[in-house]
């Protein structure tokens, strides 16, 4: 996320149209990349029980690679179609023309992410989350250095090169850490159809929830471009800041999944989820308050345009409330994935974000980006209610099989 902040700041200082084009690009790249990441997160409830015998996770990781490569290829094709999609959606020509070869560079980056094969996810599930930091540092250092060097000269093209190089660095380091944790290489094997299907029943709905969410946010980003270039740029900045405040929530939710997957009673799994929710919302609130305090300075980092800065500062409080609601619903959703009930989350996301997609363009035309952020807040609150109801329902069944056997 630090790397993303540097990228957005460098592009905003390059030109407002460059930052607006970046927002259009990420509207498709984010759902595609996070769909791959979501599919990989489906590994956690399968790997977590093998914490004390990590080698037994190797076949599961091999099975997961078949899924992620398929999802990654589909995502790469979607990224390549961004210029056509943007033109059809009515995005101004100057913004579409600014994309250049960026879609090709980011499609390659997405395939690199898919080839990672869930190394970081397995490390988290095995209780070795600290090692994930090293791949994050490698990725961040690479993207920051190359962005500062290349973006002033090449604009979006330089950002694409930096992004691809950073992805390669992160994948290399994460796989080295995984090999050390396992004590052996993952290797290759023929696909095990039954095991892959069992994994797919959790992984693909997880990928689907991420795809639905960021697909809807992509529609919101497109809707923002139908207002003005300044408002579209401001929306891009707010989206980046939202990702920053959501970072701690995502980390807490992921770290809680293995603990919930290993829980043996309903009370235990609910206790872990409740504590994770409190921590995630608190972290999101703290991050948002820091943004409120440093708002003027941060806005200046992203753009020299006074109109963009004013729009960003006016919407930071609304962004904070939306982020807190998003953090709460995310922890509940990860709880469902730990229970291998990711399909329920997918249904809830279809409801909530379906409403957002239907409302985005009309809301943008009438109330601008302020209306869009009010709509996102409402959807996050609705999702929290739905996810909480689903988690309580499915968590009540934890330990029932063991109780029946003892009886």
Image (tube, rainbow, N blue to C red):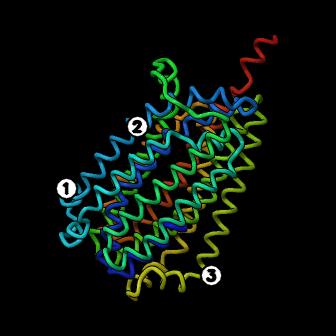
Instruction: Identify the disc placed on residue 105.
Output: none
Q: CA distance from mark 2 to mark 3?
A: 43 Å
Sequence-wise, which precedes: disc 1 or disc 3?
Answer: 1
User: How far apart are the two marked residues, 1 and 2, measured between alpha carbons?
Assistant: 24 Å
Instruction: Identify the mark nearer the N-term, 2 or 3.
Output: 2
Residue in view at x 45 percent, y 19 percent: 193
Q: Pointers 1 and 3 in contact (CB under 8 A)?
A: no
Q: Please report whichever mark, 1 or 2, sits nearer to the chain's N-terminal start.
A: 2
The residue under label 1 is 84
Residue 67 in the image: above or below residue 236 = above
Q: Position of residue 77 (x, y in %)?
A: 28, 46
Circle 2: is it few (<14), some (14-19), or many (20+) Cα within 10 Å?
A: many
Element type where label 1 sits in the image: helix
Q: CA distance from mark 1 to mark 3?
A: 40 Å
Residue 207 is situated, as x and y percent measured from the top left of the image, at: 46, 40
Give percent across and percent down for residue 100: 23, 65
Q: Secondary structure at mark 2?
A: helix
Label 3's element? helix
Pick whichever, 131 or 260, lies toward us.
131
The C terminus, quarter of image? top right
Q: Residue at x 44, y 42 (%)?
A: 115
Query: How far from the left and from the top, in percent, is residue 405?
Result: 77, 11
Name the residue nearer the viewer: 112 or 5. Answer: 112
> Of tags 1 and 3, which is closer to the observer?
1
Tell which tag, 1 or 2, sits nearer the viewer. Answer: 2
Q: Nearer the viewer, residue 239 or 75?
A: 75
Residues packed near mark 3 inside 10 Å, few (<14), some (14 to 19) or many (20 plus):
few
Q: Disc count in the image?
A: 3
Q: Which mark is residue 293?
A: 3
């Amino acid at each position: 996320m630090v790397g993303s902040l540097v990228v957005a700041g460098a592009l905003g200082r390059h030109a407002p149209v460059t930052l607006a084009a970046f927002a259009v690009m990420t509207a498709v790249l984010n759902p595609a990349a996070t769909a791959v990441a979501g599919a990989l997160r489906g590994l956690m409830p399968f790997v977590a029980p093998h914490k004390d015998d990590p080698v037994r996770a190797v076949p599961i990781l091999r099975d997961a690679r078949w899924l992620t490569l398929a999802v990654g290829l589909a995502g790469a094709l979607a990224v390549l179609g961004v210029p056509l999609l943007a033109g059809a959606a009515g995005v101004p020509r100057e913004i579409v023309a600014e994309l250049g070869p960026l879609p090709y560079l980011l499609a390659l980056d997405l395939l690199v992410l898919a080839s990672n094969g869930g190394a970081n996810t397995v490390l988290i599930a095995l209780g070795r989350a600290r090692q994930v930091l090293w791949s994050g540092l490698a990725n961040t250092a690479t993207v920051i250095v190359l962005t500062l060097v290349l973006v002033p000269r090449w604009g979006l093209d330089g950002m694409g090169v930096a992004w691809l190089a950073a992805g390669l660095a992160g994948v290399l380091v994460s796989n080295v850490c995984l090999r050390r944790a396992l004590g052996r290489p993952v290797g290759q094997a023929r696909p095990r159809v039954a095991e892959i299907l069992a994994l797919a029943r959790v992984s693909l709905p997880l990928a689907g929830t991420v795809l639905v969410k960021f697909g809807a946010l992509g529609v919101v980003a497109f809707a923002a471009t139908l207002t003005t270039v300044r408002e579209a740029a401001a929306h891009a900045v707010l989206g980046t800041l939202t990702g920053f405040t959501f970072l701690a929530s995502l980390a807490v939710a992921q770290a809680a999944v293995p603990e919930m997957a290993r829980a043996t009673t309903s009370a235990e799994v609910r206790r872990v989820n409740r504590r994770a929710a409190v921590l995630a919302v608190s972290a999101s609130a703290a991050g948002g308050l820091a943004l409120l305090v440093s708002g003027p300075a941060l806005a200046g980092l992203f753009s020299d345009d006074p109109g963009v800065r004013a729009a960003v500062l006016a919407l930071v409080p609304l962004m904070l409330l939306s982020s807190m609601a998003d953090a709460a619903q995310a922890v509940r959703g990860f709880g469902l994935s730990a229970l291998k009930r990711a399909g329920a989350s997918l249904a809830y996301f279809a409801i909530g974000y379906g409403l957002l997609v239907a409302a985005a363009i009309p809301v943008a035309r009438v109330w601008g980006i302020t209306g869009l952020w009010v709509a996102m807040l409402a959807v996050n609150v609705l999702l929290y209610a739905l996810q909480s109801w689903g988690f309580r329902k499915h968590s009540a069944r934890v330990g029932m099989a063991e109780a029946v056997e003892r009886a």
